[in-house]
Amino acid sequence: MSNRSEKTIVDIAEALELSVSTVSRALNNHPAISLATKEKVKKMARKMGYRPNTLAAGLRNNRSKTVGLIVPRISMFFPATITTIIQNKLQEHGYHLIICQSNDSYEQEVALVNTLYSARIEALAVSTTLFTTDFSHFDVFKKHQIPVVFFDRVPKDYDVKIIKGDDYAGGYKATEHLIGKGCKDIVFVSGPLTCNLYTERLEGYKDALQKAKIPFKKSRVFYQELTRENAWQTCEKIFAQAPYPDGIFATNDTTAITMLEYCRKHNIAVPGQVKIVGYSNDPRTEIVTPSITSVDQNPATMAERVVAALIEMVQTKPGVGKFSQEIIPVQLAERESSAGTFKKKKK
Amino acid sequence: MSNRSEKTIVDIAEALELSVSTVSRALNNHPAISLATKEKVKKMARKMGYRPNTLAAGLRNNRSKTVGLIVPRISMFFPATITTIIQNKLQEHGYHLIICQSNDSYEQEVALVNTLYSARIEALAVSTTLFTTDFSHFDVFKKHQIPVVFFDRVPKDYDVKIIKGDDYAGGYKATEHLIGKGCKDIVFVSGPLTCNLYTERLEGYKDALQKAKIPFKKSRVFYQELTRENAWQTCEKIFAQAPYPDGIFATNDTTAITMLEYCRKHNIAVPGQVKIVGYSNDPRTEIVTPSITSVDQNPATMAERVVAALIEMVQTKPGVGKFSQEIIPVQLAERESSAGTFKKKKK
DNA sequence: CATTTTTATGCAAACGTTTGCATGAGTCAT
DNA sequence: ATGACTCATGCAAACGTTTGCATAAAAATG
């Protein structure tokens, strides 16, 4: 039992008194090889415990059978769900996935893009940092015609394949829903405006207000990283003095949940006194009391579109089919936190 | 601007009229190269937009700078947390991580182990399937002396590096806690006994009962995959007829949360009528009403130990330091679901 | 049977690095 | 000035595949 060294196709070739090329072709089901030898080779390969060396193969034909993924963090519901699906689907297609987290740091993102390039990934899927506004670090990929797919958090004015949720519609629907429930004074808790998600949701919010002839007030919009601490502080500001809002639209569920906690702790009735809507339809919104209405972004379909785009782009090398933008629809998942309707009297 | 082809060290060498070896060494900070040329080479490399080809380097020295990770699924709290940390730390050490999900399927696990081997990863970290009892698919790695670290869900009777939580203690502490609160009839909701986690937690449960002189009843233990559906059904069984239990120890938090939902829906008071303890200290246990007591497994320290072990094993090639087993302590996070003490009267 | 076509296999170069060994130039003590 | 050393660099092989081209044998054609 040769214990030490790993078997190569050369070993197989020697054992069978064949040339390495024949062995290589046999293992790859090349049509020019007779069925008999194919069988023979494969059998021997199995017997010798041979495993192809993907590095060598990759070097030879510039195909690493690996794609890269960069997300802000894999522990948040939305990216986690997407990542899970992408990983599973890609696995089915015989591709590896190198998953990286930028931790919402621009510098890390830049570094990752470069090391992933060095690793010779065949394609890259990215959801950018909150703060990425310059996309030139992706130029290497463009230059070398390596497919890149952006999803969810995507670039503005950068010619590239984009798959995103319908954030404008999400903002609009959520706000419209609150208005429909009689809310007249709706706080909008936004992430940093450097990120497309929030600007678009904000647009939706504004337009919905306008349509209902409710004036937009700058003072009712908060821009911040959507952490628990920030959410709590925002509540403290909001509820420091009257008039209190009667609706809160939080652009992520962590924020919605935290604000709900604040309300419960301070005996502010939800949805009796203030109604809350979140964003992403994180399953946590269902187990909380009251459960929270949230905008569902259909992560599964988004993930599937991303995979489809990756595979398609990898197959058809040239940059055919000019970069397109796909928009995944969203819909509101109504729950208790926005139930009931306020009377007309208000204000 | 040469747009097409990627620059190699050969190009740099030509441009500078140096040999490729010098360029290679210069880029790798080899001591034998003069500072002057190092500078010159690096400058040119930058100018030409050179990126090292890790595949080629990896092929040459059998070092892919990549490690593999197999977990059941990356969307569950505990593995997600661990994965996140491992990924970040490894990134700091200049390693890539190929993250794979077995989806709790033994067949997938076997397949993954093989493809990861082919990808020439330098080390592998694994948390096995619920159903993995035969570990021979990992023999390839042992045979070729590639480090493997098992964590959380680990093999029994397989000589290998193991890092696990103190599941016995977890089971014991949780049960002891419930007993301390006056519970006399504690249901144990277990996962499949093919997985070490559950057998050990069960042992802890049994021993705690015994110490309190409470008889162990087989009928109070449920073995099942810990899905929401199963948890719900178990509740239906338990509460189908008296006597009802006064304590529930669920060996994961999803189950605990679901059972709490059941109780709320059926007006069974928690913790007034039945007390609940979960396992893993998933943050969801905090946002639910009432919040759920749970066993914290210190995922961060576990992840750090895994990374430390991986790095150490990768550095010191030979299988030195015979395979050890590390046990990470656990502690109970007490919350509302097990608050208050039952009177002595009971039964 | 001679020629063409088909089928199956082999040769050798190439992919981009790294590294042991060799070499030439400079430094230093004698 | 000579030999012993150090220092910086170059040569060429090697890592394990894949693949264009060549070739030998077999089959088909006239």
Image (cartoon, coloured by chain):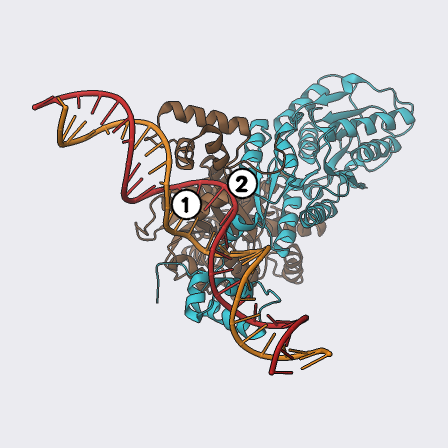
Chain colours: A cyan, B brown, C red, D orange
> B21 or D21: which is nearer to us?
D21
Q: How many labels does the image show?
A: 2
The quarter of the picture where residue A295 lies is top right
Q: Any mark on residue B310, and which?
A: 1
The residue tagged with tag 2: helix, strand or loop? Answer: helix
- Residue D30 percent coordinates (x, y): 73, 79
Classed neighbour count for the residue bearing mark 2: other residues with Cα under 10 Å, few (<14), some (14–19), many (≥20): many
- Residue A57 percent coordinates (x, y): 52, 53
The quarter of the picture where residue A302 lies is top right
Q: Which residue is drawn at 75% across and 41% down?
A: A297
> A89 or A21: which is nearer to us?
A21
Q: What residue type is labelled 1?
A: Leu
- Classify A233 as above or below B257: above
Marked residue chain, label 2 = B
Q: What residue type is labelled 2?
A: Thr
Asked if the residue under mark 1 is in contact with the one under mark 2, i.e. CB atoms within 8 Å, the reply is: no
Disc 2 and disc 1: Cα gap in Å? 15 Å
Look at discs 2 and 1 and give the one toward the viewer.
Answer: 1
Query: Is residue A345 found left or right of D27 in the rendered image?
Result: right
Residue placed under numbered mark 2 in the picture: B84
- Classify B150 as above or below B84: below
- Classify A300 as above or below C24: below
Query: Is residue A139 found left or right of A16 in the rendered image?
Result: right
